[in-house]
Amino acid sequence: METKKESEVIVVAEEVVETTASADVEVKRISTKEIIAYLAEKFPACFSIEGNAKPLKIGIFQDLAEKLTGDETVSKTRLRQALRHYTSSWRYLKAIKLGAFRVDIDGNNSAEIDQEQADFASKTLKESQEKFGNKKPKDKAPKKPYKGNNAKGTKPESKDSTDNSRKEKFNSVKSSKRAPAKAAVKLKPVETSNVVVGKNIKVQLGQSSMDAVITEVSGKDVSVQLNSGMIVKTQVKNIFTE
């Protein structure tokens, strides 16, 4: 027979196992893919996990945060991560096309995709596909050696001369088609007091600046939503106004 002390040990052990199991379920529950599936379940007119995706309304993060207030399944941090993952997917980027409409959480049309947004999404998609090996470059067939007409005593044109001629023609065509450079827009750092949710700003990403809307502010860290719908986390020092 089990003593009282042994029974207590068994009960405590069972509680520990049960608590650990619950924790494991919770960890799985809040993974990025699970959150996206959860959003698709709660807002089916807006999110999906297969088939064609719908472009999301600019500023949808705030709408979702308000709707999910008190929901222990999705914190603001995990929601932001899930949105970043969702809007960076190839399936979503393919949906950002000229003339398509963004939707709100109820599936209502919000704004039409313009050329700039469509071009940015197309560029991002291409770069992502190239980075992750979506396209395999085919091996080029070796070029056949040049056969000069030596029988007639003519001298084949040298390779360097041919290459230089081709380069000159290419540069000539390229320069004639080159669009006139746009006048540089002078940007100025945004004041800290003006870093507020919903404000339209310019965000510096690498060597270029892009239009965006501030979606969340946490100290020096700022989350913004680009015109493509992509959520990006940056810092105050990278935010500017015209």
Image (cartoon, rainbow, N blue to C red):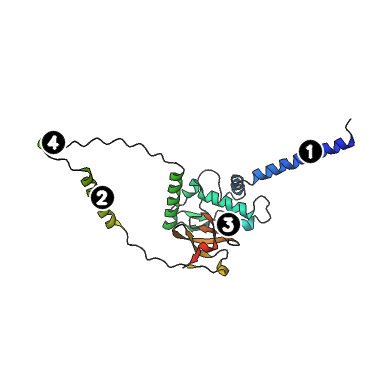
Q: Earlier in the sequence, mark 4 or mark 3?
A: 3
Residue 105 point in image, percent of width and height: 58, 54
Q: Earlier in the sequence, mark 4 or mark 1?
A: 1
- Secondary structure, mark 1, is helix
Q: Earlier in the sequence, mark 2 or mark 4?
A: 4
Quarter that holds the N terminus: top right
Residue beneath the point at 89% across and 36% down = 4
Query: Which residue is labeled 2 in the image?
Result: 167
Q: Earlier in the sequence, mark 3 or mark 1?
A: 1
Question: What is the quadrant of residue 7 in the picture?
Answer: top right
Query: Which residue is labeled 3 in the image?
Result: 61
Residue beneath the point at 58% across and 57% down = 61
Disc 2: CA contacts within 10 A as few (<14), some (14-19) or many (>=20): few
Residue 217 point in image, percent of width and height: 59, 61
Type of amino acid under label 4: Asn
Question: Distance of mark 1 from mark 2, alpha carbons?
Answer: 77 Å
Q: Earlier in the sequence, mark 3 or mark 2?
A: 3
Contact check, label 3 and label 1, Cβ < 8 Å: no
